[in-house]
């Protein structure tokens, strides 16, 4: 919900750490980010929340740095953007599963299943909407200046970080947080669906 508004602040803070990565390819940073995310999943399942939070933080920081490094040093590529999105989806889907495995209760697995279902719905709206809006923009070059149009939702990157961090800090509240996040994700997907449909019908 607040990703666009917070992007400038995030980029300003993370830009202070781009210099050491000047000669590192952004895709390499993405791979390190993915490795940190997978380590967070491992420590979640193993029941080590402090280590999981540390690697989760590293995953998010590196995920923000790869794009900044690419833009600042002229290393942007479609392949890099593609790998970055796939890595994000892998970690985002893995965290609810890891938390459910840590709790190891039927209620926890049900909550994770509902949350992942909401992610699936949201991804369908987001990906198809993005592709169709991009097709529409190609017919009207005045519609925007970004490299890729992405429909907005109630649960975006910032909100996902907040929810997942709270789940790691308070695993006993995982079910409540998972159902709340799922509900907001579904509502956001519906709003995005309606907005995108209206834009496509103009």
Image (cartoon, rainbow, N blue to C red):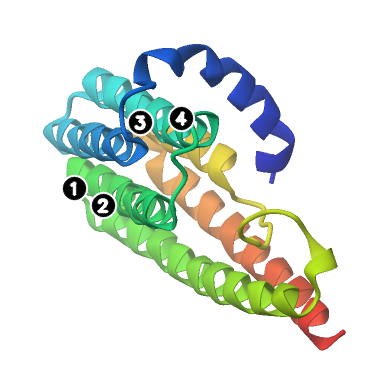
Q: What element does badge 4 sit on?
A: helix
Q: Earlier in the sequence, mark 3 or mark 1?
A: 1
Which residue position is annotated with label 1?
Answer: 101
Q: What element does badge 2 sit on?
A: helix
Q: What element does badge 1 sit on?
A: helix
The crowding category of the residue bearing disc 1, from other C-alpha atoms within 10 Å (few below 14, some 14 to 19, many at least 20), is: some
Q: Residue 168 — which label? A: 3
Image check: 91 left or right of 120? left
Q: Who is closer to the viewer here, 100 or 124? A: 124
- Quadrant of the rendered image containing residue 117: bottom left
Residue 1, image x, y percentages: 69, 46
Cα distance between the residues tagged 3 and 4: 29 Å
Pointer 1 and pointer 2: residues touching (CB < 8 Å)?
yes
Is residue 142 shown above or below 111? below
Pointer 3 and pointer 1: residues touching (CB < 8 Å)?
no
Q: Earlier in the sequence, mark 2 or mark 3?
A: 2
Cα distance between the residues tagged 2 and 4: 31 Å
Quarter of the rendering occupied by the C terminus: bottom right
Residue 151, image x, y percentages: 67, 63
Which residue position is annotated with label 2?
Answer: 97
- Quadrant of the rendered image containing residue 150: bottom right
Residue located 52% across and 12% down the image: 16
Q: Nearer the viewer, mark 1 or mark 2?
A: 2
Q: What element does badge 3 sit on?
A: helix
- Quadrant of the rendered image containing residue 9: top right
Which residue position is annotated with label 4?
Answer: 69
Image check: 197 left or right of 109? right
Cα distance between the residues tagged 4 and 1: 35 Å
């Amino acid at each position: 919900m607040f990703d666009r508004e917070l992007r400038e602040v995030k980029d300003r803070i993370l830009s202070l750490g781009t210099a050491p990565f000047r000669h590192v390819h952004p895709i390499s940073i993405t791979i390190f980010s993915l490795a940190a995310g997978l380590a967070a999943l491992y420590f979640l399942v193993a029941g080590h929340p402090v280590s999981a939070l540390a690697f989760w933080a590293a995953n998010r920081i590196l995920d923000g740095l790869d794009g900044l490094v690419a833009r600042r040093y002229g290393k942007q590529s479609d392949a890099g953007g593609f790998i970055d999105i796939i890595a994000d989806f892998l970690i985002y889907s893995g965290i609810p599963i890891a938390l459910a495995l840590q709790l190891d209760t039927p209620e926890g697995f049900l909550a994770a299943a509902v949350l992942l279902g909401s992610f699936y719905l949201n991804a369908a709206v987001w990906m198809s909407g993005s592709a169709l809006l991009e097709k529409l923009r190609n017919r009207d070059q005045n519609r925007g200046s970004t490299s890729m149009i992405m429909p907005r939702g109630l649960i975006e990157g910032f909100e996902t970080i907040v929810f997942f961090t709270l789940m790691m800090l308070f695993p006993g509240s995982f079910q409540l947080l998972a159902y709340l996040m799922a509900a907001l994700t579904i509502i956001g997907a519906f709003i995005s669906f309606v907005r995108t449909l209206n834009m496509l019908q103009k």
